[in-house]
Image: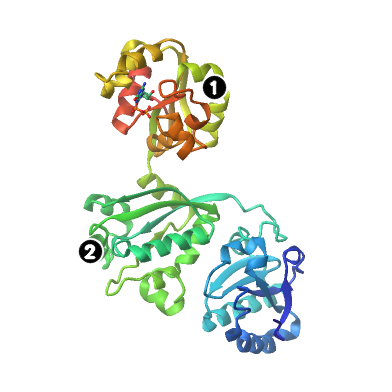
Amino acid sequence: MYVFCYEYKLSTSQLFVIPNYYILVIDVYQAWCGPCKAVVNLFRKLKNEFGEDDVLHFGVAEADSIPTLQPFRNKCEPVFLFCVNGKIITIVRGVNAPLISKKITELVQEEREIAAGQKEHSVEDASRQLAFFFPNFGIKRTDQKVEKTLALIRPSLLKERRRKYSVLQRIKDDGFKIAMQKEIILSEEQTREFYKEHENQDYFPVLLEQMTSGPTLILALTRENAVAHWRDLLGPKTVEEAMKENPNSLRAKYAVNNIPIDQLHGSSTPDDAQKELQFFFPQEHTLALIKPAAAKKHKDDIMQKVKEAGFTISKIKEEALTREMATQFYRDHKGKPFFEHLVTYMTEGPSVVMILTKENAVEEWRQLMGPTDPEVAKATSPESIRAQFAQDILSNAVHGSSNREHALKSIECVFGEIDTD
Ligand code: GDP
């Protein structure tokens, strides 16, 4: 279906050749319902208002037939992509006429100032482009580095399970990956420490009460320009501003009745993100070991996996464990029928023994190892080290500490005092 104001019906190949010298607003629609009729009058009006210098154009694109629009499929609400100079700089979801109008007006004014030589495209504009969806969209890829940001879903929203899953879905739809997560009840002390710059604000007592009232979901999110993108999705700082200025923002949509504190947090800058991530996901050490048979046969492949997973190898040595070391590693199994076999096997030949360092290292190394029994590993975690390199349950390629306390003791036992920095 074509409507007068749409000059472009974009296909997969056309997405790569859109002229890149003007503002293009694309209505991304679902095949079953066609382009959004509700905005036609608005677009016609804006075209009349701003059309004369050929700066503003409209197009439609069917989400179902264009692979790069896959994230927008099966959605009920219309989605509008705003492109400037061939870059997608923002998304508006839903027929929010005032917001669409405001964005278009701002963009046209800005383009006119740029055309008149009064202004240049800012780096910030470029960094906000949503190139994730259009990796080949005539984009200079210089600022497309993958970043991490911290996101919090606060206790009152987290209690509403359906809305919590809806936020998590939105996070995935927007191309974020959840690199780490944990659900914890923050103590008063932790809350005061995390929010120490807000301590003198009048809203602080309510914030403190809110944050300690139940579990908070803490997420480390990754994607290109994660910090700015998550912040843009959240919208204005307070619930009140968000409701007024951007009702489609997450802070407005996921506000909780009668609670003045917004329910979602995101780091403000890449520097803040680093500090906040360090606060909730401090660097951890774990003891990892490539068992004798695998050390002989698969050392290089396993080391490759260790590096790909982003661990730092803080210390490494190759040696046969003493009985004392093996007994310390497996002390929880003393008395079990396989204990003697295990200790003998582990002392038989050289192992590769390492201190691995990363946020959440203990848990992440266990994930990468996979389940103890290789048959289970093959069935449930085919990418894990044990699925790929284990022989049997005893000779199952790798060992890893089961918790932080074990990690500290085992590291001390093998490497002496920890001095990894
Ligand atoms: P891990 O932390 O995944 O290595 O597993 P555990 O701490 O439970 O066990 C330590 C090691 O003991 C395992 O890696 C296996 O090599 C061995 N093991 C555990 N359960 C059994 C078992 O039922 N039979 C035998 N033969 N070995 C086992």
Tell me where residue 156 sits by quadrant.
bottom left
Q: Is residue 172 above or below residue 340?
A: below
Q: Secondary structure at mark 2?
A: helix
Residue 404 position within the rendered picture, expressed as x and y whole percent measured from the top left: 32, 33
Confirm or deny contact between disc 2 and disc 1 (CB under 8 A). no
In-front residue for pair 195/305: 305
Q: Earlier in the sequence, mark 2 or mark 1?
A: 2
Position of 92 with respect to 342 (left or right) is right
**The quarter of the picture showing ligand 1:** top left
Q: Is residue 35 above or below residue 85?
A: below
Position of 260 with respect to 50 (left or right) is left
Q: Which mark is residue 205?
A: 2
Tell me where residue 57 sits by quadrant.
bottom right
Q: Secondary structure at mark 1?
A: helix
Mark 2 to mark 1: distance in Å? 54 Å
Residue 313 visible at all: yes
In-front residue for pair 343/50: 343
In which quadrant is the C terminus drawn? top left
- The answer to whether mark 2 is within 8 Å of ligand 1 is no
Q: Which mark is residue 316?
A: none
Q: Is residue 195 above or below residue 237?
A: above
Residue name at image x 38 percent, y 37 percent:
363
Q: Is disc 2 surrounded by few (<14), some (14 to 19) or many (20+) residues within 10 Å?
A: few
Residue 89 position within the rendered picture, expressed as x and y whole percent measured from the top left: 61, 66
- Residue type at mark 1 is Lys
Residue name at image x 56 percent, y 79 percent:
100
Q: Which residue is mark 1?
A: 299
Residue 255 position within the rendered picture, expressed as x and y whole percent measured from the top left: 35, 71
